[in-house]
């Protein structure tokens, strides 16, 4: 149980943590869909309530360097755990740099597995240096190591990004990589790209939102069914021409073929490494590879017996996958766990696309609830979100208002996905509407919190809608495409996020401290103080100022 604070008994009502996904605070308003949005509620929050800025990227959330943007996984981990752990991106980079990854049983088993079969090792994963789900340097290191260990052939199944990196950057990754593979090929090692497709089209679905994507990925990578091209870069060029305006993440699937035959189907006795380190979008395809005949998410047609490994363990509760190359961060002592141990009832809500963020990531990558927790998922639409920028903000708000009014919960949390999911589409106008939808939601939820005598902490996990155009490095103005249109920016930003203390109950007694270097990991202790508890020893400092 957490210790009671001697000086402050906590507020009478509930504390509600509201995560506005993808809501950063940029230095300049140029290209910010947030600045362009009509948002009277947020404007008045910033004008009238205590607020500070929090670091939400780089080392403040456990990424390898401050050049790395934040993302929802590391952001929600830091919020929920109240501490910063070295995250997958850093752990994998370190394991490769030290060579520890090659000494691990999992790597040795995939090598042995491939050699015992046809000698073929497959690598499936996100093909970029975004460092959110994966890094292309990790792939490169594994390809070279497989060669050095005497594997006969590698086949790469490249999920095209354009979501964590510029929206049409695929060839900047593919062309040098194909040159690298051609060199290996010339040196006598059979290394080729075998299939691929846009990451929002195949394979990388999350939270059971759309299994069709995974089915299509299976057809592409495993069965080798689909439109054939001579190389991945040719595929990207041809598909862009055939589907003008389609950005990388939405490119259709492609298969690399020679003489009409796919060059890299996945067969019995092969080894398969799914090289993403982040779990949310890796779990479904992992299940398709690992589950037996009772797998019922789609018809696999053929389920080859392979030696399968994930880069990391994606879910510690579900033990998925069984074999993994690098140990995930061992996140302990989350606020959910310690609030549960202190008898605090908790409520969590989001829509499907971010549901695991506010439950599984929040709770330190655990899919099981702690005592006294209630989770509510609002099913997301299966549509491109620029077509429905309001997403499920209204329904999440309904659920939150009902939970607050029920009087059952002391700490509640929710995530509004809009700024992030619509921000990733690169549609400026839709992104302003996404921000407006969140503003409207707040205008309904906050009065319900007032009525319950509660307080809200309004924050975000990282930026996105705050920069919708790539900015020219020199002029700091939006960069343009050759056709004169602005270059859309689909990725997250490096900007800090707000933390607003919405408090109409303390009569000005409560404020927020502006602590040097404060980040998302300072939120847990702040929530604990608001309900009258001291922070857990492992948590970073509270920002609550009790006057
Ligand atoms: C995604 O998976 O959609 C992006 O790579 C990262 O977005 P998220 O970290 O906000 O989920
Ligand atoms: Co995002």
Image: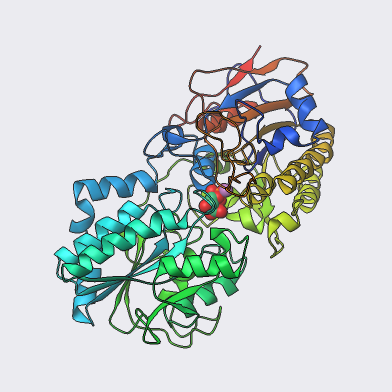
User: Dividing the image into 4 quarters, which one contains the C terminus?
Assistant: top right
Classify residue 472 as left or right of residue 445: left
Counting from the top left corner in percent of width and height, residue 323 is at 32, 66
Q: Is residue 302 visible?
A: yes
Q: Quadrant of residue 532?
A: top right
Residue at 25% x, 70% y: name it: 110
Classify residue 294 as left or right of residue 465: left
Residue at 46% x, 72% y: name it: 287
Image label count: 0
Residue at 59% x, 17% y: name it: 513
Q: Which residue occupies the extreme front position in the image?
A: 483
Classify residue 139 as left or right of residue 117: right
Q: Can residue 371 be seen in this view?
A: no
Counting from the top left corner in percent of width and height, residue 149 is at 15, 66
Counting from the top left corner in percent of width and height, residue 265 is at 37, 81
Q: Nearer the viewer, residue 531 or 155?
A: 155
Q: Which residue occupies the extreme top position in the image?
A: 547
Counting from the top left corner in percent of width and height, residue 302 is at 43, 87
- Does residue 315 lie above or below 495 as drawn? below
Q: Which of 77 and 98 is in front in this view?
A: 98
- Does residue 508 lie above or below 211 as drawn? above
- Does residue 93 lie above or below 474 as drawn? below
Classify residue 118 as left or right of residue 546: left
């Amino acid at each position: 149980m957490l210790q009671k604070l001697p000086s402050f008994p906590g507020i009478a009502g509930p504390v509600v943590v509201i995560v506005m996904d993808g809501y950063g605070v940029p230095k300049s308003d140029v290209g910010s869909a947030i600045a362009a949005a009509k948002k009277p509620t947020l404007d008045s929050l910033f004008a009238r309530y205590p607020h500070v800025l929090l670091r939400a990227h780089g080392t403040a959330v456990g990424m390898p360097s401050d050049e790395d943007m934040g993302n929802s996984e590391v952001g929600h981990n830091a919020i929920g755990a109240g501490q910063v752990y070295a995250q997958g991106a850093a752990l994998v980079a370190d394991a490769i740099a030290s060579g520890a990854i090659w000494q691990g049983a999992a790597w040795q088993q995939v090598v042995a597995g491939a050699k015992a079969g046809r000698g073929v090792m497959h690598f499936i994963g996100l093909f970029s240096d975004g460092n959110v789900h994966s890094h292309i340097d990790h792939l490169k290191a594994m390809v070279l190591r497989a060669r050095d260990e005497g594997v006969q052939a590698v086949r790469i199944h490249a999920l095209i990004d354009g979501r964590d990196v510029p929206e049409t950057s695929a060839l900047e990754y593919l062309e040098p990589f194909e040159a690298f593979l051609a060199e290996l090929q010339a040196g006598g090692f059979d290394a080729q790209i075998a299939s691929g497709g846009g990451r929002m089209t195949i394979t990388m679905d999350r939270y059971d939102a759309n299994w069709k994507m995974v089915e299509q990925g299976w057809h592409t990578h495993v069965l080798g069914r689909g439109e054939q091209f001579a190389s991945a870069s040719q595929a990207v060029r041809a598909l862009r021409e055939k589907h003008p305006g389609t950005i990388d993440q939405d490119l259709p699937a492609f298969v690399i073929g020679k003489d009409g035959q796919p060059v890299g189907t996945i067969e019995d006795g092969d080894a398969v490494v799914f090289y993403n380190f982040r779990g949310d979008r890796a779990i479904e395809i992992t299940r398709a590879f690992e589950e037996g005949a009772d797998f019922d998410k789609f018809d696999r047609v053929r389920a080859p017996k392979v030696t399968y490994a994930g880069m990391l363990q994606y879910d510690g509760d579900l033990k998925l996958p069984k074999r993994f190359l690098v140990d995930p961060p061992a996140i302990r002592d989350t606020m959910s766990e310690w609030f549960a141990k202190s008898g605090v009832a908790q409520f969590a809500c989001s829509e499907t696309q971010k549901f695991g963020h506010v439950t599984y990531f929040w709770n330190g990558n655990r899919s099981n609830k702690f005592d006294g927790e209630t989770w509510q998922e609002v099913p997301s639409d299966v549509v491109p979100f620029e077509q429905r920028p309001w997403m499920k903000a209204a329904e999440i708000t309904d659920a939150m208002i009902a939970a607050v009014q029920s009087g059952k919960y002391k700490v509640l949390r929710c995530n509004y996905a809009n700024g992030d999911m619509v921000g990733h589409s690169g549609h400026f106008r839709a992104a302003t509407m996404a921000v407006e939808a969140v503003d409207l939601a707040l205008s309904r939820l906050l009065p319900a919190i007032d009525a319950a005598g509660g307080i809200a902490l309004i924050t975000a996990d990282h930026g996105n809608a705050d920069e919708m155009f790539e900015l020219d490095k020199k002029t700091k103005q939006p960069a343009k495409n050759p056709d004169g249109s602005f270059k859309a920016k689909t990725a997250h930003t490096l900007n800090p996020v707000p933390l607003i203390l919405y408090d109409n109950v303390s009569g000005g007694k409560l404020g927020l401290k502006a602590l040097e270097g404060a980040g998302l990991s300072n939120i847990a202790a702040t929530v604990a103080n608001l309900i009258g508890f001291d922070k857990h020893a492992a948590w970073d400092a509270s920002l609550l100022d009790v006057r």
